[in-house]
Image: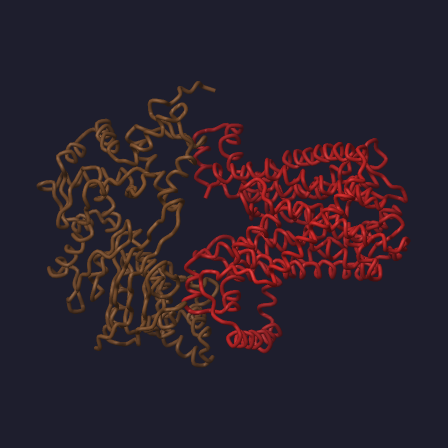
């Protein structure tokens, strides 16, 4: 196997303008994919891994930096690459065979040849007999097989996979992973390298030769983990678990000093507003209660994810929230309740709300909102006004979600009230007593 | 059944109340009317119309003529829709002007343009050709806007990953149109086409029976047949005419639209099978026909293949982000020419408007108020009967199966076709034309409401119906807490379309030539129609612009807000 570099990413940054500030999707990424490698881009949602994939295939042009393919700069869509999409991106109005053939037709492959190749690939992914079926008649797993067949039909050197298994049920996903690995390891496809995006740590360890770990705010590469296990790999083997643990530790251990950790208030020049983790409070209390039952109030995050059957990405957001609120600490892939977290987990509902309130009052984001409310007429703010202020710091869709989270957390802590029909945020004390109409 | 169960979509292109683009549109309209008026002076002073035969044997021929006019206008609409929508969806800068422009254009009273187009054309070509072109343009303007909105909306909502798949497999523009954009928009295009045909019939009737002063621009066709029959009080001929019209409309529905809908089922994007699948006997016949299969295999498919091959040689692959918005010097020159033309035209049109006397302005004000009152009245009557009936039809399958064909056929008869008949009965009564005007508005618009209410009622979740039954809510409480709130978005959508249609109908409704006499009532539509007939172009210009302004302001101040409220608070999806 030669070790020629297929893809080189050099100093790639992607920015979007939002309000007065810039939103940085990925910052200064350097990355090399060699001939014969199966590389995974792994990270929490919002770390820019899908953006990076689109930049590498040439679907998107980076704000800064460049992408080289076999030493040549990529201009426009790289004809040697293709993508398998998370939502399959099949044309619902074309049959299985037409979906595969259309990719070949656009490459000017003659009629007879494209039919032959399409049928052969449909056979190879195990869909023979379904050539004339429409995607809507197929299960998710079978649809993604069509996605693979279509991608392989154009014989790409670089096969890019954008979370290809995350929309599938557990069993289909696992069987499809094994099928793909078999094709890849046996050299049955002309593909030179595979680049896969995922947030599933076990999937990454199961399939790849190398894991490029990314983190968010801003999206960046934080680690590069070699997976040197022979195929076929076993989830339960100690070596496998060790690597998964290490990746968890890398992802969960990105804690930064206090002033960065809680961020600054929106609008502070040079500051960075810390976004609230996108979680529900019920799930947070659930995790904390489970931790309180553990010996020493400590659990391995990977085991916890397995036990709670939680998506690793979501569990990491929960641990992030627990840490942000001072309910837990993270170290080497383990999570431990703080004494405060323990008190919270064992408290009754009203006490919990009080503890929660004191904790979120610490966050600059809430301090900022409460200050604005105090200064406002009647201590009330329109939702849109607050949203506009947040949009100076976040892209609009994130700002909307953040505002929803602020309202949800604030309502739980009983420091905010919100009236959905008038779209007005109140301080809890300032709610006007409504007369019965 | 499926036909009734679809809620029509409304697209508001922008959220701001007014833009400078609106001003440009209003000015452009003024200039157009002015140019037409100038040309009209050149038109022949007396034009004698064709003789319309009332023999039933002549009807098939008239039907063919009318359908051909509709088809020509529809073809024009499709071409306009594809081109206009495509540019608006792909070019950011163009979009900012083109979408508000479309929004205003659809509020323009279509019939105001007819005399201008007609007289303008008859100055440069023979009056027969002029009348044909004018009628086609008129029908076109009644068909095209909703289609363009639908196509634009489809283009801008193509899922991102499908677009990316297109780019990654390096499809060229033709492949993208053929495999992605047209199929994605197909269902919306077909539904909008059906709506457009219904609207087209309404105005075809008016376009065929047009007279300006001593100039008779009548065209042989179903519309003029009915008009002549009513004029002569020939009941037998009226029956024949209406029968023929219904037959044509049913035939088109069965032979064209229904098969198309069944065929378009494959373009559903939802990845689940299920739902009520529409049926069409004619589609089944076509599918089983050897001749059609042969045509498909020997002609259509090879033609498609060679078109594909040609496009691969000629068209480059397109990237995902729509490319640069360069302004070339050519387009800059065109823009400059257009702007200076507009400025000059504005100056001349302003001069024309200055000729309108204060008394005429007062009449316009009174007319607007009177027509507004009629529109509101028609809308209220429509609401009063469509909500209970629609709710019953939407929730009661048995009743729906029984009533649906009746409702459909009744709804398919264009109100303008029945207007002469209506007049025959009402003209003798005190205030007869007033009554007839409200009735015409009602007949032209109530169906939008009814169909929307039925769609809404059939979409009320079963769970909620069960819950309210379990809670033992009284009939009244059930209406207040469940039925009305869930119908609200549908009623709003229907009412918006209905009110727009009612304003447009006012021009036909408030003024009529009947049995050799001219009858009219107070209203803006009547002012427009009378100034047309008298060739009073300053008044035509002033009244048309006033009506556009009022309709646009009502849309933006009232309907748009109501629509947003409906979408935000009462949408169940």
Tell me if residue B30 can be seen: yes
Location of residue B520 with respect to B77 vertically, above or below: above
Location of residue B565 with respect to A212 vertically, above or below: above
Q: Colour of chain A?
A: brown
Quadrant assignment for the C terminus of chain B: top left
User: Viewed as shown, does residue A2 lie left or right of A338?
Assistant: right
Q: Colour of chain B?
A: red
User: Viewed as shown, does residue B69 lie left or right of A61?
Assistant: right
State which quadrant residue A392 falls in.
Answer: top left
* Closer to the camera in the image, B102 or A90: B102
Q: How many marks?
A: 0
| Extreme residue toward the left, this view | A296
- The image position of residue B264, as x and y in percent, is 55, 60
Tell me if residue B119 can be seen: no
> Residue at 43% of width from left, 36% of height from top?
A384
* Closer to the camera in the image, B55 or B448: B448
> Residue at 20% of width from left, 64% of height from top?
A210
- The image position of residue B530, as x and y in percent, is 82, 42
> Residue at 83% of width from left, 31% of height from top?
B430
- The image position of residue B489, as x and y in percent, is 54, 39
State which quadrant residue B447 falls in.
Answer: top right
- The image position of residue B434, as x and y in percent, is 78, 35
């Amino acid at each position: 196997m030669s070790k020629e570099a297929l893809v080189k990413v050099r100093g790639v940054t992607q920015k979007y303008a939002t309000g007065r500030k810039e939103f940085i999707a990925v910052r200064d990424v350097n990355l090399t994919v060699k001939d014969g490698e199966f590389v995974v881009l792994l990270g929490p949602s919002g770390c820019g891994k899908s953006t990076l994939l689109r930049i590498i295939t040439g679907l998107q042009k980076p704000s800064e930096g460049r992408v080289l393919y076999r030493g040549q700069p990529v201009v426009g869509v790289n004809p040697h690459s293709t993508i398998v999409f998370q939502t399959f991106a099949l044309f619902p109005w074309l049959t299985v065979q037409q979906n595969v053939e259309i990719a070949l037709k656009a490459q000017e492959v003659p009629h007879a040849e494209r039919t032959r190749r399409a049928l052969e690939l449909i056979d190879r992914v195990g869909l023979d007999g379904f050539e004339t079926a429409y995607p809507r008649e197929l299960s998710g797993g079978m649809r993604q097989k069509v996605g693979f067949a279509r991608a392989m039909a154009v014989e790409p050197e670089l096969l890019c996979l954008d979370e290809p298994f995350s929309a599938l049920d557990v069993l289909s996903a696992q069987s499809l992973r094994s099928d793909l690995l078999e094709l890849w390891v046996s050299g049955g496809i002309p593909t030179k390298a595979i680049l896969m995006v995922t947030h599933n740590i076990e999937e990454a360890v199961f399939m790849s030769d190398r894991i490029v770990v990314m983190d968010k705010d801003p999206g960046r590469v934080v680690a590069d983990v070699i997976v040197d296990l022979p195929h076929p790999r076993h989830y339960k083997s100690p070596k496998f678990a060790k690597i998964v643990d290490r990746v968890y530790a890398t992802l969960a251990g990105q804690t930064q000093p206090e002033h960065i950790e809680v961020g600054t208030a929106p609008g502070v020049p040079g500051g960075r507003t810390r976004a609230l983790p996108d979680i529900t409070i019920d799930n947070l209390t659930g995790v904390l209660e489970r931790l309180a039952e553990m010996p020493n109030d400590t659990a391995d995050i990977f085991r916890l994810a397995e036990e709670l059957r939680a998506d690793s990405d979501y569990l990491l957001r929960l641990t992030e929230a627990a840490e942000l609120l001072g309910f837990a600490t993270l170290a080497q892939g383990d999570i431990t309740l703080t004494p405060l977290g323990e008190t919270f987990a064992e408290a009754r509902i009203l006490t919990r709300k009080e503890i929660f309130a004191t904790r979120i009052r610490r966050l600059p984001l809430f301090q900022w909102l409460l200050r604005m409310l105090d200064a406002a007429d009647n201590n009330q703010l329109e939702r849109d006004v607050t949203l506009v202020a947040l949009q100076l710091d976040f892209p609009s869709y994130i700002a909307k979600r953040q505002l929803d989270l602020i309202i949800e957390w604030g309502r739980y802590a009983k420091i905010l009230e919100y009236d959905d029909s008038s779209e007005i945020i109140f301080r809890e004390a300032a709610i006007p007593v409504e007369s019965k109409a | 059944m499926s036909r009734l169960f679809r809620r029509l979509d409304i697209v508001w292109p922008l959220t701001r109340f007014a833009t400078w683009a609106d001003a440009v549109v209003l000015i452009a309209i003024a200039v157009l009317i002015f140019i037409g008026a100038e040309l009209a002076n050149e038109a022949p002073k007396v034009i004698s119309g064709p003789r319309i035969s009332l023999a039933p044997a002549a009807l098939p021929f008239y039907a063919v003529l009318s359908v051909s006019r509709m088809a020509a206008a529809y073809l024009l609409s499709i071409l306009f829709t594809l081109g206009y929508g495509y540019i608006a969806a792909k070019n950011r800068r163009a979009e900012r002007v083109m979408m508000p422009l479309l929004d205003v254009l659809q509020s323009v009273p279509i019939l105001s343009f007819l005399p201008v187009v007609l007289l303008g054309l008859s100055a440069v070509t023979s009056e027969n050709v002029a009348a044909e072109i004018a009628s086609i343009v008129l029908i076109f303007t009644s068909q095209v806007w909703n289609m363009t909105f639908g196509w634009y909306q489809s283009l801008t909502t193509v899922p991102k990953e499908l677009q990316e798949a297109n780019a990654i497999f390096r499809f060229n523009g033709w492949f993208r149109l053929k495999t992605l954009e047209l199929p994605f928009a197909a269902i919306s295009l077909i539904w909008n086409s059906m709506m457009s045909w219904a609207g087209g019939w309404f105005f075809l009737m008016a376009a065929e029976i047009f007279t300006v002063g001593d100039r008779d621009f009548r065209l042989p066709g179903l519309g003029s047949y009915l008009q002549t029959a009513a004029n002569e009080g020939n009941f037998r001929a009226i029956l024949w005419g209406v029968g023929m019209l219904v037959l044509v409309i049913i035939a088109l529905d069965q032979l064209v639209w229904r098969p198309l809908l069944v065929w378009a089922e494959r373009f559903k994007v939802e990845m689940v099978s299920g739902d009520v699948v529409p049926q069409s006997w004619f589609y089944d016949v076509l599918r089983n026909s050897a001749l059609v299969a042969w045509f498909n295999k020997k002609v259509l498919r090879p033609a498609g293949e060679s078109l594909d091959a040609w496009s691969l040689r000629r068209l480059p692959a397109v990237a995902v982000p729509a490319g640069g918005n360069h302004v070339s010097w050519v387009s800059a020159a065109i823009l400059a020419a257009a702007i200076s033309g507009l400025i000059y035209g504005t100056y001349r049109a302003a001069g024309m408007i200055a000729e309108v006397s204060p008394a005429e302005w007062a009449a316009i004000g009174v007319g607007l108020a009177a027509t507004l009152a009629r529109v509101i009245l028609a809308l209220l009557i429509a609401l009063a009967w469509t909500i209970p009936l629609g709710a019953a039809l939407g929730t009661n399958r048995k009743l729906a199966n029984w009533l649906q064909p009746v409702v459909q056929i009744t709804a398919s008869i264009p109100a303008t076709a029945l207007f002469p008949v209506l007049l025959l009965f009402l003209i003798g009564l005190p205030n007869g034309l007033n009554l007839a005007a409200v009735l015409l508005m009602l007949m032209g618009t109530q169906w939008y409401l009814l169909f929307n209410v039925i769609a809404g009622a059939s979409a009320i979740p079963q769970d909620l119906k069960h819950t309210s039954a379990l809670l033992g809510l009284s009939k009244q409480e059930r209406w207040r807490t469940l039925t009305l709130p869930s119908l609200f978005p549908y009623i709003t959508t229907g009412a918006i379309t209905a009110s727009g249609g009612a304003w447009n109908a006012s021009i036909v409704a408030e003024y009529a030539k009947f049995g050799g006499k001219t009858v009219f009532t107070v209203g803006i539509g009547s002012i427009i129609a009378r100034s047309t007939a008298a060739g009073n172009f300053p008044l035509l210009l002033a009244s048309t612009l006033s009506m556009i302004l009022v309709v646009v302001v009502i849309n933006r101040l009232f309907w748009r807000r109501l629509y947003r409220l409906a979408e935000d608070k009462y949408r169940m999806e």
